[in-house]
Amino acid sequence: MQNLIFDAHLDLSMNALEWNRDLTQPVYALREREEGMDDKPDRRNSTVSLPEMRKGNIGICVATQIARYVKPGSEIPGWNSQEQAWAQTQGQLAWYRAMEDRGEMVQIHNLDLLRSHLSRWENQNDGNLPIGYILSLEGADSMVNVSYVEKAYQNGLRAIGPAHYGPGVYAYGTNSEGGIGAKGRELLSEMERLNMILDATHLCDESFWEALDHFKGHVWASHNNCRALVPHNRQFSDEQIKVLIERGAVIGGAFDAWMLKPGWILRKSNSRDEGVYLKDVIDHIDHVCQLAGNSLHSGIGTDLDGGYGTEQSPADLDTIADLQKIPDLLQQRGYSEEDIDNIMYKNWIRFLEKAWG
């Protein structure tokens, strides 16, 4: 019997709209259709589609909207105005709505919907159930001003990561330095009023500490690994992980190969050549568990469709359905059945029950 899985970070709508992938199709059909294409780094190597998620019993995910605003001269791609970024996220929302209309997905934005969906997947799953998704915003640049936060909340948005890569409107993200400033504090205050979840993923160190000082609501890290194992500012230090644990956070292990093992060179290294495997994901999950002294703060947050594919995923993972290999790997490390259930989905469920209860 397969374990139920909650994946706390997938960029589904970005892949559908910007990569032009019909995610209702099998992964192998997506790869075949992309033969000869080279406009994206992971063409022909995709690992995620909705049928493949069902095959892997991934019944719930946190699904993103993402659209970065960039100033003139930025080396990071993005939209040239916040209004354009907002419009892009609304297109992404329209795709999720279309998936709901088709019966492929169902939005989960309160406790009753969460419990009902969970019950169906635990007790009535026939392989054709819609995949539940909690809507999250990766980088808050598309919030033209703070009044847009409530507009997004009314559309089901329940979590926000204030920054992504580089300097953002409301915070500084990966590979940049700076604090949250007045706009960031205003954003966090509105999120707290609406009982939205703060996703600490991607915040640079200064913004991370300022955000946690100013935000008193619920915090998680949807897809983040450990700096002690792979030294880079994208990862969390042990000190950061301990503070997140104290705040009741769950930290989702990410599957991007450069975050799993030191020495990776983007666009040059290959998972098989570098010897990156699913066991390396377990190392990061285990590190969080050891810091916590239990299995209650680790989860899965793959980011498997975050601009890379099999070339930059663990070498023993072909599609997202291979997440079903994780329980055996955890068992080999001495984790009990209860621990494994916690990591695969129950920690995220308990977090949401507390946040929404």
Image (spheres, grey):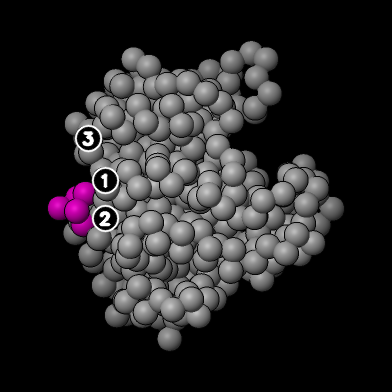
The extreme right residue here reads 36
Residue 91 percent location from the top left of the image: 49, 37
Q: Amino acid at mark 3?
A: Lys
**What kind of element bears circle 2?**
helix
Residue 280 vs residue 109, the one in the foreground: 280
Labels 1 and 2: the sequence-earlier one? 1
Q: Amino acid at mark 1?
A: Arg
* Nearer to us in this view, 247 or 164: 247
Residue to which mark 3 is pinned: 216
Q: How many other residues sit within 10 Å of disc 3, few (<14), some (14-19) or many (≥20)?
A: some
CA gap between label 1 and label 2 equals 11 Å
Residue occupying image coordinates x 32% and y 76% = 338
Indicate which label's residue lies in the foreground, 1 or 3: 1
**Residue shown at the point (67%, 15%) measured from the top left:** 73
Q: Residue at x 53, y 18 (%)?
A: 81
Residue 304 seen anywhere in this rendered image of the structure = no
Dividing the picture into quadrants, the one containing residue 316 is bottom right
Residue 26's x, y, as percent? 62, 67
Dot 2 crowding, Cα within 10 Å, few <14, some 14–19, many 20+: some
Report which residue position mark 1 lands on.
247
- Residue 32 placement (x, y as % from top left): 76, 63
Point out the tag, 2 or 3, that comes first from the N-terminus: 3
Magenta part of the protein: which range?
353-357
Foreground: disc 2 or disc 3: 3
Is label 1 or label 2 in front?
1
Give how far apart the Cα atoms at labels 1 and 3 are: 9 Å
Mark 2 and mark 3: Cα distance apart in space: 15 Å
Residue type at numbered disc 2: Phe
Asked whether, in this view, residue 41 is left or right of residue 50, the answer is right
Q: Nearer the viewer, residue 80 or 33?
A: 80
Residue sitting at x 65%, y 59%: 313
* Vertical position of residue 239 compared to residue 116: above or below: above
